[in-house]
Image (cartoon, helix red, strand yellow):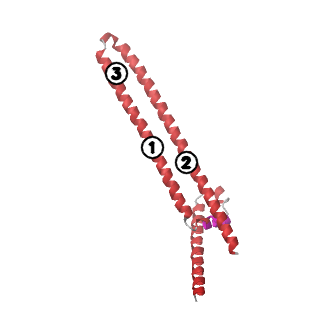
Amino acid sequence: MERYTGAFEEAVDGARQQERHYQLLSALQSLVKELPSSFQQRLSYTTLSDLALALLDGTVFEIVQGLLEIQHLTEKSLYNQRLRLQNEHRVLRQALRQKHQEAQQACRPHNLPVLQAAQQRELEAVEHRIREEQRAMDQKIVLELDRKELTLQMNLLELIRKLQQRGCQVGKTAL
């Protein structure tokens, strides 16, 4: 009797897994329809079915969630770096304005035009440096995000490939 119960449970599990596979495959097919036609043509039914099989146990979803959390932390860190740089620039501008005001107050009136011209050149040089630092920071952020995104995609593809191979091996041993 226990043998029949075990066989029945295996059949129910198999049916559940088949239904889940069908749901995942349907969802993937719907998502593929949203892609440009050139990509749709590259994703055959077999490829989508294999991908759905690889997604069955939920491990991929957990790993994707973990990778997304890492990416969000990276984005937050980069954002905070950018804010720190902007704050440093704000403090630098304030200090420069204060320095210029003090110099102008201590300056003799006939030297004021010369001082103001020198201060204008200094201000322009500082603003140029600030723009360059901000541009360099923005480039660094974009490159880091691109690198993280590509790494995420490569890791996901490798994981799916391994799961797919494991699924194919399990399928062969079942035969």
How far apart are the alpha carbons under marks 1 and 3? 32 Å
Left or right position of 3 against 106: right
> Whole-percent x and y of residue 155?
60, 54
Residue displayed at 60% across by 77% down: 14
Left or right position of 18 against 119: right
Disc 3 designates what residue?
100
Disc 2 designates what residue?
148
Q: Is residue 9 above or below residue 140?
A: below
Tell me the mark number nearer the camera, choosing from 1 and 3: 1
> Which quarter shows the N terminus?
bottom right
Taking the view exactly as shown, the residue that stands out farthest to the left is 105
Label of residue 79 in the image: 1
| Residue 38 falls within the magenta-colored stretch | no
Question: Tag 3: residue type?
Answer: His
Q: Which residues are magenta?
A: 45-53
> Which quarter shows the C terminus?
bottom right
> Whole-percent x and y of residue 17?
58, 74
Q: Report whether residue 36 is seen.
A: no
- Element type where label 1 sits in the image: helix
Q: Nearer the viewer, residue 167 or 138?
A: 167
> Whole-percent x and y of residue 35?
60, 57
| Residue 48 falls within the magenta-colored stretch | yes
Residue displayed at 31% across by 21% down: 101
Label of residue 155 in the image: none
In which image quadrant can residue 48 be found? bottom right
Question: Tag 2: residue type?
Answer: Lys
Sequence order check, earlier mark of 1 and 2: 1
How far apart are the alpha carbons under marks 1 and 2? 15 Å
Q: Main secondary structure of the magenta part?
A: helix
Question: Tag 1: residue type?
Answer: Tyr
Badge 2 vs badge 3, beta-carbon distance below 8 Å? no
